[in-house]
Amino acid sequence: DSGVTQTPKHLITATGQRVTLRCSPRSGDLSVYWYQQSLDQGLQFLIQYYNGEERAKGNILERFSAQQFPDLHSELNLSSLELGDSALYFCASSVAGAGGTGELFFGEGSRLTVL
Amino acid sequence: QKEVEQDPGPLSVPEGAIVSLNCTYSNSAFQYFMWYRQYSRKGPELLMYTYSSGNKEDGRFTAQVDKSSKYISLFIRDSQPSDSATYLCAMSAGTGKLIFGQGTTLQVKP
């Protein structure tokens, strides 16, 4: 058990809908990262938050947004969903922020299926 | 061209074989190099971590980094069926942003 908790584990929804994925980082970790994993693209970095502030941005679509709350949990919002958004969404956490060593601890992922 | 290239395999070996997994990269700013292991239906977990060039050994696992060639490797000695998983290389320039390879699926047959 990595200590990172993600909910829901599975989600099935329709095109055009909006969903929210939730992540609780390991106790003491200030950074939260979101990754998308699909068969053809592998593990793609979406966004990083450090202590409530956005720290780095990757290939995150404009339809997607995220935030980190004062209690350090994070939410990833996906809107106007398309079939191609079906993937595993991972949250990871680490103690470090910018300049970190990359030792991330991953949750078990939220599997999103868009029909 | 992707920043990190990794052959997705699959790679199938008999139990006890030496396994070699590799990644190449294009960003010379990468300084931190990692290997993650991902079992089916689980999140990736850190297996090996190396800073800059050189070798690092941990039990049956050895990680090598050659920054001059922009090439990293993971060797698994005396491979076991429990090593069957997807192995992902990952790299960072120290910004906190970790870039992953596609992942290589390994199957070790008893």
Image (cartoon, coloured by chain):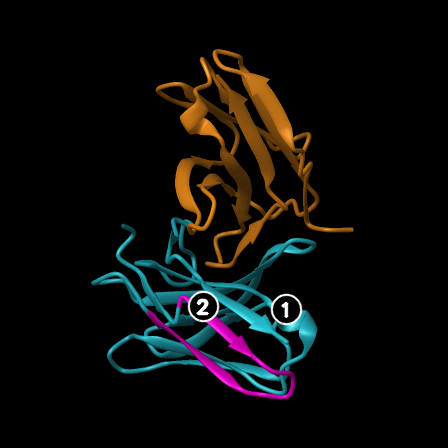
* Residue A12 is a magenta residue: yes
Q: Amino acid at mark 2?
A: His
Q: Quadrant of residue A40?
A: bottom right
Q: Quadrant of residue A45?
A: bottom right
* Residue B18 visible at all: yes
Q: Colour of chain B?
A: orange
Residue B27 vs A56, above or below: the answer is above
- Is B17 placed left or right of A59 in the picture? left
- Is B60 placed left or right of B86 in the picture? left
- The mark that comes first in sequence, 1 or 2, is 2
- Residue B64 screen position, x and y as percent: 53, 25
- Residue B94 screen position, x and y as percent: 48, 53
What secondary structure characterizes most of the magenta part? Answer: strand
Return the residue nearer the eye: B55 or A43: A43
- Which residue is under mark 2? A10
Question: What chain is colored cyan?
Answer: A
Residue A18 vs B10, above or below: the answer is below
* Residue B4 is a magenta residue: no
Residue B29 vs A53, above or below: the answer is above
The region drawn magenta spans A9-23
Determine the residue positioned at 54% across, 87% down: A18
Q: Secondary structure at mark 2?
A: strand
